[in-house]
Image (cartoon, coloured by chain):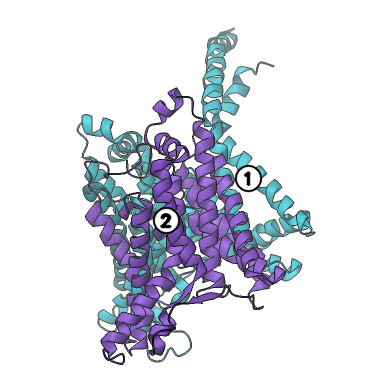
Chain colours: A purple, B cyan
Amino acid sequence: MPDMHSPIAILLLSLFAGAIRVSTPYLFVSLGECLTEKGGRVNLGLEGILVSGAMSGYAGAFLTGSPWAGVLIAGIAGLLLGCLHGLVCSLPRVSDIAFGIALMLLGTGLAFYLGKPFIEPQAPMLPFIDLGMWTSSPQLHNALHINLLFVIGVALAFVLQWGLRNTRWGMVLRLVGDHAETARAMGYPLTSVRIAATAVGGVFAGIGGAYLSLVYPGSWNEGLSSGQGLMAVALVIFARWQPLRCLWAALLFGAAGALGPALQAIGVTSGYYLYNAAPYVLTLAIMIVNCRPDRTLAGAPGELSLTR
Amino acid sequence: MRPNAPAARVILSLLPALPTALAVVGTLLLFSLFLLVQGQPALDAIGLIFEGAFGSSFAWQSTLLRAAPLMLTALCVALPAQVGLIVIGGEGALALGGMCAAIVPQILPHGTPWLVATPLMAVAGMLAGGVWIGAVGALRQWRGVNETISSLLMSYIAIALFKHLVEGPLRDPASLNKPSTYPVPDAMMVGSIPGLDTHWGLFWGVMACLAAWVFVKFSTKGFAMRVVGGSHRAARLVGLPVNLLALTACILGGAAAGLAGMFEVAAVQGSANASLLAGYGYAGILVAFAARQNPLAIIACALMIGGIEASGSLLQRRLDLPDATTLVLQGLLFANLLAWEALGGRIAAWRVKLQAVAQTDLPVQLEQTHA
């Protein structure tokens, strides 16, 4: 048995635990964004939806007494805001990127406004699954407390990966996103498909927000999100619009996000803010490495304004 | 009813403002609805917003204090927008600009006259902001990295750097409760405009907007930038240095945001600290979109958004509404502004019709004056 008390082991263990704990919001938002972008639109407003989901999920769990009702309510909030983005961007001359920025502001504003009464009270949290019964190390045991939402997210990634390739719905969505003219010629309702994709993407982002307030960090306050919703957009580019790769990328981002607290746990406290910026630096580095000015990225939906 | 020529000309000149005007009306309706649903007095609230923004000399002072940095951070969005880039990282450029400006007095020898020191602080702030947003432009043009995402990431990184330096290496040990850099000496602080209770940053903000407007509308470089914004491919075909123009627009925008940070430090806060991160960079995005990226219109829109933000405390005191109320109002305004853009096609059609009316009647009018 390796020494579980050496700083390196503790660091790696907290990174591993962090990867699972911190990655879930990234996972849900990136799957939502992946779905939206497969239809040919970008929704930068998922950051606003994430915060709205966190607030409404927490409020829902507190008012009904059931955390799962909170998750449902967060999903509905995401659905409404996703529909708003989908509908307004279907109007002529409305830029999806610009409206995403507006939705970021609107969603955050609504969440802060309506969430004021819920900062103090304690809502019931989502339960954990204990996978660490076999180990004697308390740290490892702690790391293996896995939340059901994470498991659902992983399953969702597999389902989407399969569904986009093997179902009629998935094929239509990809066709609409890759070549609108062909889709129109074949008689598919372009606008409705895109609105539906944005709305479902909103549901995922809302649930990702509920994880923030109902699992980890597990409370509602105005500084809850640190830009995960926006980083998820970059994460989707890194994952080349593949749901399964979104899963691995989300785990990587989760580990990067856990770097600051993990280093603090072993006594490195000097550059706290700098280590906390690790996910941003990682995202930027990934985009610099992956993007090319002269061609669109492999796997990018053809109708996407983001990569042109 | 067919409008006559003078009326057509008046309508024609007001036409570009129509979507913005409709968006403001739509926003106020939705905002009233939002408050009425909760049983709040909507009309009182809207009245209070106007009162809190422009109702008294104190309100005006508070509005102008916010409008000054907003004009500069809005330029950080509007200038890159001329070349077709959506840059939303003004907050980070403001923070770094403020921090670099705050370092300058530490480096200068003791007793440097303000006439040297203050411009140097401004240059330091502009350099920091220009480099930061310039990097975003360079990544876009030479690496194809989406500028909207990268500018926000760069902004987050800048804010982390700012917090690290202000609370660590650059911290004044005397600042106990609120970590700050060493204070700017009183002699180097920027004072108030005579007759107004507002610092000179407002004057320079207006000047920057005017200069940007002249540059964009009347200079060859500005025209070239708008060609790039219209179509990268067309600009390349006529041999314009597309990459260089885009980079210049980003550097100028970043410099404006950096200057905003310098004034926040040298005229308001007195040192670089967390109060600098008041969201001016984000609100500047809204200002620029409300002004439809026109530098001249930014002056008016900065007053409007500055006024909305200034009215927050009055809403809180009188109606007990949360401080996020102004954030909801801004979000609604932003969404409305973009949604009413959909009218653009109709407006273009109306413009053609009105132009026809205005021109066909022109000779008739001349004949009348001759007679």
Residue A52 in percent (x, y) is at 58, 61
Q: Nearer the viewer, residue B306 or A114?
A: A114
Mark 1 nearby-residue class (10 Å; few <14, some 14–19, many ≥20): some
User: Where is mark 2, residue-wise?
Assistant: A157
Residue at x-position 71% and y-position 69%: A63
**Quarter holding the N terminus of chain B?**
top right
Label 1 secondary element: helix
Judging from the image, mark 2 belongs to the subunit labelled A
Mark 2 nearby-residue class (10 Å; few <14, some 14–19, many ≥20): many
Tell me if residue B305 comes above or below residue B344 in the rendering. Answer: below
Tell me if residue A218 comes above or below residue B238 in the rendering. Answer: below
Residue B213 in percent (x, y) is at 40, 44
Tell me if residue A260 comes above or below residue A191 in the rendering. Answer: below
Q: Nearer the viewer, residue B182 or A210?
A: A210
Say whether residue B298 is visible.
no
Residue A109 in percent (x, y) is at 59, 60
- Quarter of the view holding residue B160: bottom left
Label 1 is placed on what type of residue? Answer: Val
User: Where is mark 1, residue-wise?
Assistant: B24
Residue at x-position 41% and y-position 89%: A138
Say whether residue A70 is visible.
yes
Label 2 secondary element: helix
Residue B246 in percent (x, y) is at 28, 46
Residue at x-position 66% and y-position 72%: A118
Side of A306 relative to B275 (left or right): left
Q: Nearer the viewer, residue B241 or A269?
A: A269
Judging from the image, mark 1 belongs to the subunit labelled B
Side of A213 relative to A266 (left or right): right
- Quarter of the view holding residue B55: bottom right
